[in-house]
Amino acid sequence: MDISVEISKYPLRDNYLDGVDDFLERLHQHPRLKIAVNSISTQIFGPADVIFPILQKEISRSFESGQSPFVIKVLKGDLSEMTIKDY
């Protein structure tokens, strides 16, 4: 089943953008993910059985460098045609 995930990471440190950029770079290393990034969040689209293990791995890896709350929304289906665009 395809899903759409909206995810935001909030590293609790002064140089928080470094933590966000590192997480995004790691996500982009997974070629089976369709990813859209904007200034508010990141959207990920693809099969649930592909996305969830990747998120588990990459979120766990983020926790190794300190507290980083994540906010995640999951919807059924590939909603990539409805992504938020930066203006």
Image: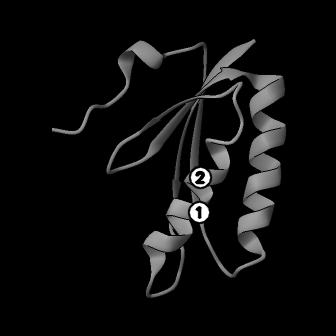
Q: Quadrant of the N terminus?
A: top right
Does residue 19 lie above or below 7 as drawn? below
Q: Residue furthest left?
A: 87
Residue depicted at x 56% and y 52%: 24
Could you tell me residue 73's position as x and y percent?
56, 39
Image position of 56 with respect to 4: above or below: below
Q: Is residue 81 left or right of residue 70?
A: left
Which residue is more in the foreground, 84 or 33?
Answer: 33
Return the x and y of residue 6 as percentages of the image width and height: 52, 38
Residue 38, percent from left and from top: 35, 43
Mark 1, secondary structure of its residue = helix
Q: Which residue is mark 1?
A: 22
Q: Report if the CB atoms under discs 1 and 2 are less than 8 Å apart.
A: yes
Amino acid under disc 2? Glu
Say what amino acid the circle numbered 1 marks: Asp
Q: What element does badge 2 sit on?
A: helix
